[in-house]
Image (cartoon, rainbow, N blue to C red):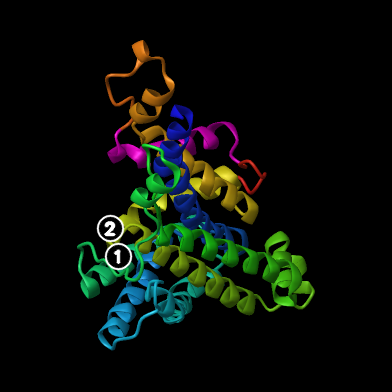
Amino acid sequence: MDLLNALVALSNFVIVPAIAYGSQLALGALGVTLIYGILRFSNFAHGDTMAFGAMIAVLVTWGMQAAGVSFGPLPTALLALPFAILGCILLVLITDRFVYRFYREQKAKPVILVIVSMGVMFIMNGLVRFIIGPDDQRFSDGARFLIKARDFKAWTGLSEGLAIRTSQVITVVVAVAAVAALFWFLNKTRTGKSMRAYSDNEDLALLSGINPERVVMITWILVAALATTAGVLYGLDKSFKPFVYFQLLLPIFASAIVGGLGSPLGAIAGGFIIAFSEVTITYAWKKVLTYIAPANLEPSGLVQLLSTDYKFAVSFVILLIVLLFKPTGLFKGKAV
């Protein structure tokens, strides 16, 4: 019985949150790896692109709620998601047209585009804060929990309860659907194959008649869709706060680099590696160890390696180790 209680506590505070968080990081890292693999630069504005898309979803959700529109037990934000994706697509296409396109035509080095993306990042960050403010904004409605801890205890007779939030289940389901759709698009459609060819060998792709501007446009559309979806799912699972998306840039880049920058499969694997690392290292293990340790060896302290305030430091250390010893990542992407 104690072992089951320990397993439930572990699932409640580590496994389930890490799976949801890993799904969000994987979607964010996919956007980063698409930009790096096809447009060949590290987009530092990606976190704030997520914030912009999520902000539109928040505003549209509030409008729908004011008009009495709901999605039953599911969050109304899911109805607002397509509008948010369209708004984010418009933003990134305008940004590309008036900013990045100039540097592509000048054949600017990747480091120049990285610096330019940092400027875009600050502008987007300021724009989002100006429109919606810097504070936490909650936009989730519907059923909050799919499984409640109290009901789980009543069903099982265990002293530990398992609580699974609706937002966590939605995150995993939507992430799986989005990743499946992306892989189908890249591997089965003519446009997707053109994008892969352009990524592998730009000169040969141009000789084959591939339109580079169309490839760039489709890439930005996919990145906007992934970024908005990741941003909305993160906001539903936690809350929407513009500065947090800026901070998310570190674990997202760590996910992409750990998996292998330029590798979509690597981005997904890296997202879950970073998520489980952050959650595991910052979790206080006292409750789990109390159930499984002998009575005379029960821990008196929290048994927490790092405070949750330092969870992004975990991403930084992992990123540093990978860059030092295996810069191509697990799936042998492109070295940074």
Measuring from the top left, give residue 136's x and y in whole percent. 23, 62
Look at label 1 and name its amino acid: Asn
Rendering coords of residue 6 (x, y %): 43, 32
Tag shown at residue 310: none
Viewer-proximal residue among 44 and 167: 167
Q: Residue at x 40, y 29 (%)?
A: 288
The crowd level at tag 2 (other Cα within 10 Å; few <14, some 14-19, many 20+) is: some
Query: Is residue 311 within the magenta segment?
Result: yes
Q: Residue at x 46, y 77 (%)?
A: 85
- Residue with the mark numbered 2: 243
Q: Position of residue 53 (x, y in %)?
A: 39, 72
Closest to the camera, between mark 2 and mark 1, is 2
In the rendered image, residue 195 lying in the magenta stretch gets the answer no
Q: Nearer the viewer, residue 93 or 162?
A: 162
**Quadrant position of residue 55:** bottom left
Q: CA distance from mark 2 to mark 1?
A: 8 Å
Q: Secondary structure at mark 2?
A: helix
Which residues are drawn in magenta? 307-327
Question: From where the camera sits, is residue 25 visible?
Answer: yes
Q: Choose between 231 and 332: the one closer to the eye.
A: 231
Q: Quick check: marks 2 and 1 in contact, CB under 8 Å?
A: yes
Mark 2 belongs to which amino acid?
Phe
**Which residue, given by chain and number where applicable, does mark 1 sit on?**
125
